[in-house]
Image (cartoon, coloured by chain):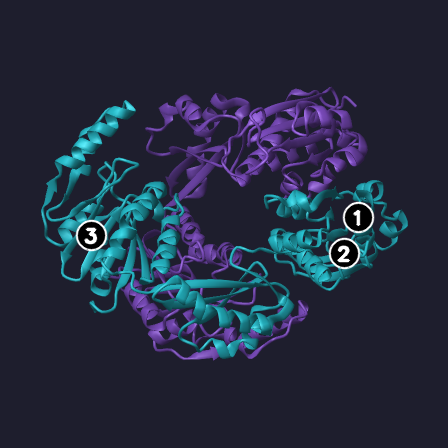
Chain colours: A purple, B cyan
Amino acid sequence: MTNVEVKVAEVISVGSELLLGDILNSNGQYLAQELAKLGIAHYYQTTVGDNPERLQQAIELAASRANLLIFTGGLGPTPDDLTTETIANTFQTALVERAEVWNDIQAKFAQRGRTLTDNNRKQALLPEGADILKNPVGTAPGMIWSPQPHLLILTFPGVPSEMKRMWQDIAVPLLKAQGWSADVIASRILRFWGVSESALAEKVSHLFEQANPTVAPYSNWGEVKLRISAKAPTTDAAMALIAPMEAEIRDIAGIDCFGADAQSLGTAVGALLQQRQETLAVAESCTGGGLGSYLTEIPGSSQYFHGGVIAYDNSVKQSLLDVSAADLAQLGAVSEAVAKQMAQGVRDRLGTTWGLSITGVAGPDGGTPDKPVGCVYIGVAGPVNVMAKRYQFGARGRDWVRRVSVCSALDQLRRACITTPFHLD
Amino acid sequence: MTNVEVKVAEVISVGSELLLGDILNSNGQYLAQELAKLGIAHYYQTTVGDNPERLQQAIELAASRANLLIFTGGLGPTPDDLTTETIANTFQTALVERAEVWNDIQAKFAQRGRTLTDNNRKQALLPEGADILKNPVGTAPGMIWSPQPHLLILTFPGVPSEMKRMWQDIAVPLLKAQGWSADVIASRILRFWGVSESALAEKVSHLFEQANPTVAPYSNWGEVKLRISAKAPTTDAAMALIAPMEAEIRDIAGIDCFGADAQSLGTAVGALLQQRQETLAVAESCTGGGLGSYLTEIPGSSQYFHGGVIAYDNSVKQSLLDVSAADLAQLGAVSEAVAKQMAQGVRDRLGTTWGLSITGVAGPDGGTPDKPVGCVYIGVAGPVNVMAKRYQFGARGRDWVRRVSVCSALDQLRRACITTPFHLD
């Protein structure tokens, strides 16, 4: 069935842990998205365990109906990591140790002060004729191998961070250079906070019927997204189709749209603060550091983020944030007054332009009729005033309440920044 | 290849949205876990798009090597939902409308005040001879069908909530009643920190050859795991096979093993602190609140975690943690002295048993020859002393450095707790 004109990929995920359900196969989704972006057709994904006979059967089948085989998993140092040798056996090719890989493994172990074992040496073996697909992150390299005409094999470790890095750094440029990517599908994702999916969908419903570009809504953890996708011979041509659609949606959505693609609420707030040359400190109760952690995911955030106080225990709210003991006793830690004092306290103590606070009931316990699980107060202290707002995120689990609290706090600060004139201090 | 003695399942997920990466295939993991619980062997999972020829190829292959075929997806009302009719075509059987299903669909639409379309009637069609697999949640029923001897087909909608409900309510009792679940596979996952996968594998290599229970290693984000799996007529019997193996591994691994199954480094540290009636505060620089956030993921963590200081900017290290300005200037924020002072400072300020600090170079910028990206100091201040340790996590990305720093800090505290006598304060 292999056809040189039609280029078809197939993804094979290897690992008994996948068949036992110990691990969610997120690599499958990632590669599916990436192949779609490149415009490479892709008709099957197979998951198979650490069993050489069954893996070989999957390889033979895939090679009979596809000409780009992408493997993830089974490249580790242990005896049940069988992907490389099974591929070599399927195409009756010997494995050869690569000095370059072995040196790299030795160097990585030395750098981390770890002891090499005989097992690790196995990772330096690749089929004769295969090229090394370098792994800049971990020890297991992959391979780039064409064991027969019109068949290209790429192997990646199962660890998503390593696989993604190798895919982006090496596989994508290689596939483009080899002409795998004829028509390009480009996408742009517009991101929204503070508006529901159905409310936004209604506002832009006239766009959903279009064929190229297409617009599709989705939502995840309180955030709403619109994906605009266009197909064209080049990325530039596809982006030119997307641009007017994006402009129209941004015009309709207004302040609810906080960014696009990799822009998060954190980078949106960071860009605003940098542009305004302002600084931020946080005071966190129920999120326990999650807001600070989210802000500092961003390289360079030290330019505007100074730090803060994790005031999980009420004693810390008093000692490090100057929250009134009387208010804590009478109004409770989850209250408008305490949220305001936390925001003001951290702003004063750290001497920043803005103080941002979160105090709420993350659950599963601790809810009351007045303040049920999911009740969260977010405070913003700034150059003009200090305010706090009550949210009811619902008893949808501790993770949900904490994560949505972090995003809502950033969104509240974003809106406060946008509506506050510069340099009032 | 079908063998009546050996019962083997295969999972086929249908939907072009899976191959475009729009949806993560969480059903695959769920069914894998469920089949493992039932002790039903399961060697392949296949994902295929909404294409009848390719779906039929997948069905024929699965029927040739398994005797329980489980389908998810493709049962909806739209023309691209093709699972039911393709299965019927593969086994050359006519579709027949089921009055019971059609009545149920009409009733559900009436109840929700929605308008029926002709498309919906398609969902009432099932192959002649198939039983209805009722859907108590949505409109699409599945089927229970044995089109030929020693072959059982079950179909489920792709929506996870509907699939799971139908699986639990109907499929699990059916499979047990039909004797599919003769043997149970139970697993226990032992979890390790501070030892490499290959070093641990070498220590327990004599266990990898065993057939029942089996032992398999894997690793993820710096954590190493050993999965012990046993097959037996009941879960209790399987766990009885696992117990001595677990004891042997724990004996070999010693303090490197921090827990099993759902126990994380966070819950392990939490259990130690609760048992010792001790408390903890954190001082974070490069992790920016990630350690506090990780600790407070755990409900009830307020019993031992009081809070801390996010000292991202050096001014905060001085003002809220009493770190020496001279040391910051001469030794730098990433140094043993500063890590110790941060741990001691937060312990003193918050009045806790333990103070735990992290200061390092998360990257991508900020590395120097002396302190390259990935260089992190972790400090522990306790009842006996204060110490700090230097780690080199490598330039494997900001996320990696920050996440491994948080886990290493917890592990360092865990080891300090275990080796420190109770109640010294």
Label 2 marks a residue whose chain is B
| Earlier sequence position, callout 1 versus callout 2 | 1
Q: Secondary structure at mark 2?
A: strand
Query: In this rendering, is residue B276 above or below A116?
Result: above
How far is disc 1 from disc 2 in space, using C-alphas? 9 Å
**Foreground of the two, A4 or B324:** B324
**Foreground of the two, A159 or A309:** A309
What residue is at 76 percent from the left and 56 percent from the top? Answer: B380
Residue A371 locus on image (x, y percent)? 58, 27
Q: Secondary structure at mark 1?
A: helix
The amino acid pointed to by label 3 is Glu
Q: Which residue is mark 1?
A: B347
Q: Tell me the number on the disc at residue B53.
A: 3
Q: Is residue A66 visible?
A: yes
Residue B141 locus on image (x, y percent)? 23, 41
Label 3 marks a residue whose chain is B
How far is disc 3 from disc 1 in space, using C-alphas? 67 Å
Q: Seen in the image, is A361 located left or right of residue A342?
A: left
Which image quarter is the N terminus of chain B in? bottom left
The amino acid pointed to by label 1 is Arg
Q: Seen in the image, is B266 located left or right of residue A40?
A: right
The amino acid pointed to by label 2 is Val
Q: Which residue is mark 2?
A: B380
What residue is at 75 percent from the left and 57 percent from the top? Answer: B377
Q: Nearer the viewer, mark 2 or mark 3?
A: 2
Q: Tell me the number on the disc at residue B243.
A: none
Q: Secondary structure at mark 3?
A: helix
Packing grade of label 2 (10 A; few <14, some 14-19, many >=20) is: many
| Earlier sequence position, callout 3 versus callout 1 | 3
